[in-house]
């Protein structure tokens, strides 16, 4: 079976996969039924995973979700209790880390303090007894790639955090691995440097065409750099797909909240027919499309309306007759709009964030400024949305 | 008036604690000062005041063959002990420190156990042991005693330093493709050698100075502390002062040279 | 590799090859240390223990007959009782004195010195390695009838006769053994204090604690491990010292270590010497137990 596949039917808690959008080709890394247990907890539940050659895949999740453990199992620094790890068709499950064609950029600075920068970068080739001239070439190429061509003679202690991680990257690349693994390499750095290095990493990925497997808990980082994102939670992959897919259709309340989405409501499925759901949020009813993993009737679930999905109109602009309250009279009537008042305004520049209180809840609404007036606190407003924009999801 | 004086001192930051510390340090170095002083005294009687200065005790000390052979013997024992303890102890400390396994606690306790006993008991046990085996006592039997006595301290000092070694460095080396031996040679060894050297010097110093275990395990050849002991038993021998001063000078030199390695643990 | 193959491999249990291999290799590399400790320490101590139950024929001879007579002699003889009491006295007082004297110095080095820390510690190390015998010998010069103290006091006019009790007495032994164990005690305490954040002490002062109170309530509990270490080390070394009593102890300052040494070197009664040794170790064991209780002390 070529093409990406992630947990098909094994774990009952997971969503079925988004369709593969990555490049067709060979499978770089395949994990089958990989499990890892530590004394007190299961770090990784039986897991299947396939990563295509040349992809930039990110394992995204909160700390403790097993993403680093998974990465280390690919690197060979941890052995799975069960299951197999295959790299470009070769079963490497029993092979120690030094015999695998992968390299890892660690979270902490792990440059060897007793060697210079050039000696660090040359470490891998030297081990394999590559002749000196070739090694020098590789070192030079790697340092140029990370934009630190003159740093060869420096001592490790003289480097800043950003420079050190760049050298660590150069060291890994100089070793010419088939897959590059990165374990939150930017988490210890300042925001600005992090942004800069994210862009550089993406650029290097494009230039080398190498398979990158990245681990992070920063959803912005994951979304901005990856071809595909695998969201993990408590040892399982809970959603996989391109950044756009995941953003448009988060499969669960967990993923939605983790991506920083607002307006997540717990609901119950009141009715389901012909691909549409009626969701009961207590005093309000909403209509939404059935998600990819269908939710049966009576099931407790969650829904999201993204802040940018709302249309916001001040009530005083409406003709008197249409100013009806948003709270429906009967439980069965689906809300078509909500009426409320602006509580808070945050003007960011091109975007303005409103907090609107309507139907007993606070709603985050964002709008582009452009030529429209920025509304003020206290303004009564009406919120409308298109039913397609309501995202139903599992509440796990 | 006293109060004004105290206030002036207090302003300079000199309080009761400073006075105490000065006095304690004086106390610690007083005997050594006395020793050095008397080593240059012309008279053979160790009483105050000093009447004249001379180097005769140094001449006597070095002219005496037993003193010289004592120094040689002490050096031989110290070096032998140093080598054995460094080899055995480094192996043990690195393994226990880097691999978590169930026997670790037991191994560590056993290795540190000799430090829980006075040198007397270790010496006596060894003497008894050699007697039962009908072994003649010699410098070799002394070395065994020194190894047992110094191993716990070597292990303690080295373990403490090893804890600072980042295990991810070794993982990074493995990730680069280094085999176990390559990792050791290129990454681990260079990084732990300062710690190993510092610990080895501790062993050398302890062995050089050792008396309590040596006393029971010595054969015909005496180490320097034993020589001093026998001389001071027979009579009040002023050349002991000279020998003592030389020992102080020796330890000053050693500590000065290894300052780089030792300073690390307290900075 | 299709999914079906994957299912098959998943069904078979996979042995944890790497982990067991590593463990076996580690155990193998620990062999040298094991051999050294067993042959040089465990075995001799065990044999000594056995020896304590033998019957002595004098001059190192023993019969195969096992008995408790050595232990009984050790416990009942008035000579050994006196020596034991002496030892406990000197050991106990000496250890406490060492701790009390060392603590302020360790505190000063750790919290009050900015740049001189390493220098002072080095100096203390030098004093430590200047020669055990040599230092005891130096004290005879200081405490003797014509020594520093006496001639000094005579010169000032405080005394007309040299103070006899300064040398060859229990006091002399006490002074010397305390002197000998202060350097190590300072090193142990300073080491323990390294991990204490000076901010904690400042915080206590800020909350209103006096200097002394800060030390007793905050610092002491934090360095309790070091204090216990200092006490344990001090007591063992002082109680087991058999050289100092011989050189400066006279008749009143003798300790049990001398008796033990005597049995092995002069008298040839190994069983008795061994019994005395193990009784001493038993006392140490009690001390360790008490000290582990102390470690949980939270300070006044």
Image: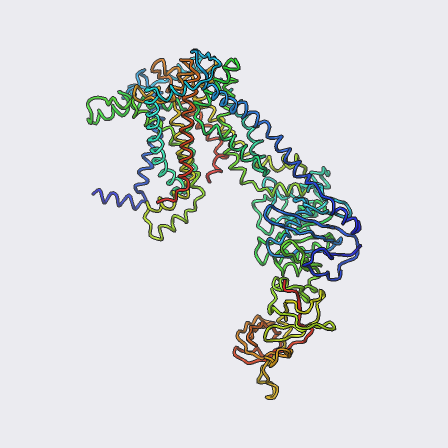
**Residue A390 higher or lower than B72, as above or below:** below
State left or right for residue A215 relative to residue B72: right
Q: Position of residue A169 (x, y in %)?
A: 66, 49
At 58% across and 37% down in the image, what residue appears?
B102
Q: Is residue C137 visible?
A: no
| Front one among A236 and C178 | A236
Instruction: Name the image quarter holding the C terminus of chain A.
Output: bottom right
| Front one among A136 and A208 | A208
**Residue B259 higher or lower than B169, as above or below:** above
**Residue A379 higher or lower than A166, as above or below:** below
Q: Position of residue A353 (x, y in %)?
A: 57, 72
At 46% across and 13% down in the image, what residue appears?
C62
Instruction: Name the image quarter holding the N terminus of chain A.
Output: bottom right
Tally the numbered discs.
0
At 67% across and 47% down in the image, what residue appears?
A73
Q: Is residue C7 visible?
A: yes
Q: Position of residue B231 (x, y in %)?
A: 38, 15
| Front one among A154 and C118 | C118
| Front one among A285 and C67 | C67
Identify the colour scheme used. rainbow
Q: Position of residue A365 (x, y in %)?
A: 59, 73
């Amino acid at each position: 079976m070529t093409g990406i596949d992630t947990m098909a039917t094994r774990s009952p808690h997971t969503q079925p996969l988004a369709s593969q959008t990555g490049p067709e080709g060979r499978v770089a890394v395949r994990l089958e039924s990989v499990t890892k247990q530590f004394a007190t907890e299961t770090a990784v539940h039986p897991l299947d995973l396939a990563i295509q050659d040349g992809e930039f895949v990110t394992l995204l999740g909160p700390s403790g979700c097993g993403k680093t453990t998974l990465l280390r199992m690919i690197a060979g620094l941890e052995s799975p209790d069960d299951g197999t790890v295959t790299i470009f068709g070769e079963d490497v499950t029993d092979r120690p880390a030094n015999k695998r064609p992968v390299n890892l950029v660690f979270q902490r600075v792990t440059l060897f303090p007793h060697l210079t920068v050039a000696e660090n970068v040359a470490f891998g080739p030297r081990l394999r007894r590559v002749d000196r001239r070739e090694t020098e070439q590789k070192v030079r190429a790697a340092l140029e790639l990370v934009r630190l061509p003159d740093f060869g003679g420096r001592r490790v202690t003289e480097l800043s955090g950003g420079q050190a991680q760049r050298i660590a990257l150069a060291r890994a690349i100089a070793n010419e691995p088939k897959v590059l693994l990165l374990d939150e390499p930017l988490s210890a750095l300042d925001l600005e440097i992090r942004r800069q290095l994210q862009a550089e990493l993406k650029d290097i990925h494009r230039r080398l065409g190498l398979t990158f497997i990245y681990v992070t808990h920063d959803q912005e980082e994951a979304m901005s750099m990856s071809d595909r994102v695998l969201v993990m939670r408590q040892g399982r992959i809970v959603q996989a797909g391109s950044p756009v897919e995941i953003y448009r259709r988060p499969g669960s309340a967990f993923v939605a909240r983790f991506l920083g989405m607002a307006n997540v409501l717990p609901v119950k499925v009141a009715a389901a027919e012909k691909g549409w759901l009626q969701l009961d949020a207590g005093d309000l009813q909403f209509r939404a499309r059935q998600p990819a993993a269908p939710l049966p009737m009576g099931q407790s679930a969650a829904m999201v309306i993204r802040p940018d999905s709302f249309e916001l109109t001040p009530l005083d602009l409406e003709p008197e007759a249409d100013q009806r309250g948003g709270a429906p009279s009967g439980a069965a009537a689906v809300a078509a709009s909500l009426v409320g008042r602006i509580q808070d305004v945050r003007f960011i520049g091109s975007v303005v964030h409103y907090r609107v209180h309507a139907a007993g809840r606070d709603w985050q609404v964002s709008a582009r400024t452009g030529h429209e007036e920025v509304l003020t606190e206290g303004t009564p407003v009406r919120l409308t949305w298109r039913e397609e924009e309501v995202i139903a999801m599992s509440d796990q | 008036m006293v109060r004004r004086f105290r206030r002036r001192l207090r302003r300079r930051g000199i309080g009761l604690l400073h006075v105490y510390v000065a006095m304690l340090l004086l106390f610690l170095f007083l005997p050594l000062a006395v020793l050095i002083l008397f080593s240059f005294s012309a008279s053979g009687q160790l009483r105050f005041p000093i009447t004249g200065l001379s180097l005769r005790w140094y001449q006597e000390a070095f002219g005496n063959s037993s003193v010289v052979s004592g120094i040689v013997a002490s050096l031989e024992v110290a070096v032998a002990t140093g080598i054995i303890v460094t080899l055995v102890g480094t192996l043990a400390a690195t393994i226990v420190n880097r691999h978590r396994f169930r026997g670790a606690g037991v191994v560590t306790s056993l290795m540190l156990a000799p430090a829980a006993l006075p040198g007397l008991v270790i010496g006596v046990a060894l003497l008894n042991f050699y007697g039962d085996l009908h072994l003649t006592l010699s410098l070799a039997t002394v070395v065994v005693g020194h190894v047992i006595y110094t191993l716990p301290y070597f292990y303690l000092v080295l373990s403490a330093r090893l804890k600072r070694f980042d295990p991810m460095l070794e993982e990074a080396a493995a990730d680069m493709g280094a085999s176990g031996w390559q990792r050791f040679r290129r990454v681990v060894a260079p990084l732990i050698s300062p710690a190993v050297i510092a610990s080895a010097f501790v062993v050398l110093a302890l062995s050089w100075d050792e008396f309590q275990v040596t006393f029971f395990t010595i054969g015909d050849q005496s180490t320097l502390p034993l020589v001093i002991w026998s001389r001071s038993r027979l009579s009040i021998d002023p050349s002991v002062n000279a020998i003592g001063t030389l020992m102080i000078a020796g330890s000053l030199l050693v500590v000065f040279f290894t300052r780089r390695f030792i300073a690390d643990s307290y900075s | 590799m299709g999914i079906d193959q994957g299912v098959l491999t998943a069904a078979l249990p996979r042995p944890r090859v790497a982990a067991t291999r590593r463990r076996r290799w580690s155990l193998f590399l620990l062999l040298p240390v094991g051999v050294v400790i067993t042959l040089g320490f465990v075995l001799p101590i065990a044999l000594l223990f056995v020896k304590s139950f033998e019957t002595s024929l004098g001059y190192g001879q023993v019969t195969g007959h096992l008995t408790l007579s050595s232990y009984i002699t050790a416990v009942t003889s008035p000579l050994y009782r006196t020596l034991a009491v002496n030892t406990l006295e000197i050991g106990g007082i000496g250890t406490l004195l060492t701790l009390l004297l060392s603590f302020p110095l360790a505190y000063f080095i750790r919290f009050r010195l900015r740049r001189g820390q390493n220098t002072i510690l080095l100096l203390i190390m030098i004093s430590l390695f200047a020669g055990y015998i040599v230092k005891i010998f130096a004290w005879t010069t200081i405490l003797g009838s014509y020594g520093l103290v006496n001639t000094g006091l005579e010169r000032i006019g405080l005394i007309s006769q040299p103070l006899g009790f300064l040398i060859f007495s229990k006091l002399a032994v006490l002074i010397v053994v305390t002197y000998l164990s202060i350097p190590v005690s300072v090193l142990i305490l300073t080491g323990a204090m390294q991990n204490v954040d000076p901010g904690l002490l400042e915080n206590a002062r800020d909350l209103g604690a006096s200097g002394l109170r800060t030390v007793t309530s905050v610092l002491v509990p934090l360095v309790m491990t070091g204090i216990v270490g200092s006490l344990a080390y001090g007591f063992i070394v002082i109680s087991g010292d058999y050289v100092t009593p011989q050189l400066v102890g006279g008749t009143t300052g003798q300790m049990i270590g001398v008796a033990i040494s005597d049995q092995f070197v002069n008298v040839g009664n190994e069983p008795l010497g061994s019994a005395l040794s193990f009784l001493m170790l038993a006392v140490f064991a009690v001390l360790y137990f008490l000290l582990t209780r102390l470690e949980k002390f939270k300070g006044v």
